[in-house]
Amino acid sequence: MKSLERKVFPYLMLLPMIVIFGVFLFYPALNGLWISFTKWDGINAQEFVLFDNYIKLAGDGDFWRSFIKTMVFTVLSVPGIYVAALGLALLLTRAIKGSNLFRAIFYWPTMISSIVVGLSWRFLLGEFGVINYIISLFGGEKISWLTNPTAAMGVIIFVTVWSMAGYYMVMFVAGIKAISQDYYEASEIDGAGFWQQFWYITLPLLKATSLLVLVLSTVTVIKTYPLVVALTDGGPAGATKFMVQIIQETGFEKSQMGYACAMTMVLFVVLAVLTSVQFKLNKGGSEGEN
Amino acid sequence: MKTKNKVSGKVIIYILLVFFALVFLLPIVWIVFSSFKTAGELFAWPPSLLGEHPTVDNYLLALEEGDFVQYFVNTVFVSIVATILTVIVNVMAGYVFAKYDFRFKKLLFALVMATLMIPLEVIMIPVFKVIVATHMYNSLWGLIIPAVASPTAVFLVRQYYVPIPTELMEAARIDGASELKIFLRVMLPIAKPVIAVLCIFSFMWRWNDYLWPKLVINDKAQYTLQLALANFSGEYSVDWNSLLAMSVISMIPVLIVFLMFQKHIIGGMTAGGVKG
């Protein structure tokens, strides 16, 4: 028979967390759904308009262009992050001296804020920046990195990979170290080279880590916002304006909060699908360990 | 033949490692050096590493301007207070999820994990409404309080406590200790490693965060460093001299935390990322 104290204690301990999630997460989430059915400028009374926002959204070229740009950006960045993170992890796990130092150097950019990362690259990539100088040393022409739409998209993808690869590299290092050395020794006796070992041992045994890295990085990349604010501010001419930025502008700068909430529902559906995949992967992973 | 291959393999690995190390390191090194250049030399062509007259004027200018010191103090305040509250709230929750049986436990834990599906980006408009309604708009507390509960942190703490034997608690109960005392005297002190991980990640995230400040703060006096840097860079003519100096200063606390706690960071990341 448990004492009353022991029955009540857990709820008291959970209370702060429950209140915060309730007030600042679950209530706003439901309220957001309601707001998406209303016309609201953030000041005057909300006016119920049923599906008007969604109908308008379906035909909103600006939003869907931004949606497509976000997807293109994600589809190009995520493989870049994956290859860079895995490549660096492979180099680091070749049992060499100084690997801790190199690991720290590769990880370091992930610790810098997106704003400072964006500002730094904007400075480096300016018309008279050091990158253009290096290009000129090799006899190349100056490139308008941030005013040419295609170049700007390329820059954002590169900087995203640069600033995130170290994070997922650490996961791959852990995954590679968990692979039994016996596989490699046995395959060496059979005369397998580096690439054969990579294709037939390392990569298949990293499947769980790989999937997790892909899902986690996709979820993060889709939400890209501060980096773009500091690097291109969505420009030139909206070429790098992704979903979070267009939602932010619609809600807070154009004061169309109801309409912006309808936009967030699209983002929510995409993220919810990806997050549920992540849950499945985590479950699979922990069952495999037991 | 075989050893020769191995040696040349090692050389290739080192060349690649050094190349990538330069790619990851040099941009920031260049920024740091540039922050000591005079306005005239910042965009000199051809550029040089330090210019002819390296100076600390950019830093003095940034520090003399009272606002920057204010932003720094605001950021320190938010990061430290939020980290303390984050540890308290999530350790309390993670502990009882690991060590107690109670009604609705499964449902509550599922709800905590479900919050991963609702990032701030998705609910920024209704959250803004709550911030205004609770009179936290333009207040640093509005930055701190709404984000102190974290599903990842709860999960990490729970994972830490699950393998710790319940006998410790039973023994204390027989001695007549209250549940709160058991937590504070017995179970909390042994959680130091996971608390260290929470502190580092919470501090880093708060220091670098942009979206919450953007949402909650409009009054310049309440700016955090990231908000200030983003806003100055959006101005019509960007003052790169002070902007670079401010960026470098804003990176220093992060660098210190990184150098001091590198092992914790990388260990905690794999625990939280791969499993959480």
Image: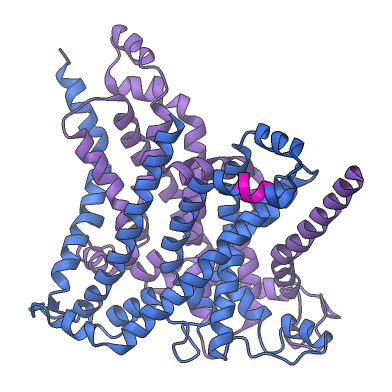
Chain colours: A blue, B purple
Tell me: residue B179, above or below residue B29: above
Residue at the spot 46% in from the left edge and 49% down from the top edge: B202
Magenta run includes residue B115: no
Residue found at x 76% / y 78%: B37
Q: Is residue A98 above or below residue A126?
A: above
Residue A211, given in percent of the width and then of the height, sits at 47, 52
Query: Which quarter of the figure has residue B109?
Result: top left
B231 left or right, relative to A169: left
The majority secondary structure of the magenta stretch comes to helix
Q: Is residue A200 magenta?
A: yes
Residue stretch in magenta: A197-202
Residue B139 x, y percent position in the rendering: 34, 63
A235 or B236, nearer to the observer: A235
Q: Nearer the viewer, residue A19 or A287?
A: A287
Locate residue A45: give its quadrant.
bottom left
Q: Is residue B248 left or right of residue B142?
A: right
Residue B218 in sight from this viewpoint: yes
